[in-house]
Amino acid sequence: MCHEIDSEIVLANILKEKEECSFFDLITKKREIEAQLADVWVDVTKKSVFASIENHPNMFSWGNERIHKVAGSTLFESTYIDNYFNEDIEEEIRSTVITILTE
């Protein structure tokens, strides 16, 4: 079975720990996850990332060639990411994916 990790999951977890990230950061995390977990595909395509930014304007913004955590967003300080985003990750791969994204 192939597992797909959407870019919004990647962004939410990375930006939970940082204020901003680049496409290079996303691709690096994608490669780490896909190297450690067979049958996992991480979608960090430009189209997917910009759709995630557009769909979650209260969490993510784009500027200066980087993806930013929206200043003042309380969603990163709550259980929202675990309850909304991380619940979509299949249980057998969830801890590995989250660990890689938040290191």
Image: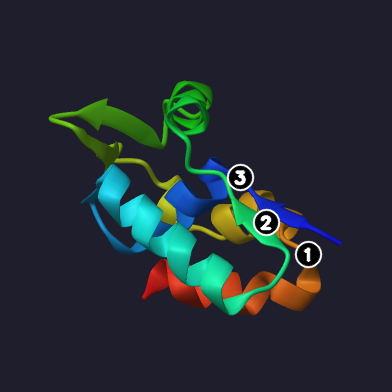
Q: In this picture, is 50 found above or below 98?
A: above
Disc 3/disc 1 C-alpha distance (Å):
12 Å
Query: Which dot marks residue 83?
Result: 2
Residue topped by disc 1: 90
Query: Which dot marks residue 6?
Result: 3
Q: Position of residue 96 (x, y in %)?
A: 59, 78
Disc 2/disc 1 C-alpha distance (Å):
13 Å
Disc 2 marks a residue whose amino acid type is Asn
Of 58 and 61, which appears nearest the observer?
61
Disc 3 marks a residue whose amino acid type is Asp
Based on the displayed image, in which of its 4 quarters is residue 79 positioned?
bottom right
Based on the displayed image, in which of its 4 quarters is residue 81 positioned?
bottom right
**The N terminus - image quarter:** bottom right
Residue sitting at x 79%, y 58%: 2
Q: Quick one: label 1, few (<14), some, or many (20+) residues within 10 Å? A: few
Residue sitting at x 61%, y 45%: 6
- Determine whether label 3 and label 2 are within 8 Å by CB: no
- Identify the mark nearer the N-term, 3 or 2: 3
**In terms of secondary structure, where does tag 2 sit?**
helix
**The C terminus - image quarter:** bottom left
Question: Looking at the image, is mark 2 or mark 1 nearer the viewer?
Answer: 1
Q: Position of residue 45 (x, y in %)?
A: 47, 36
Disc 1 marks a residue whose amino acid type is Glu
Q: Is residue 43 left or right of residue 1?
A: left
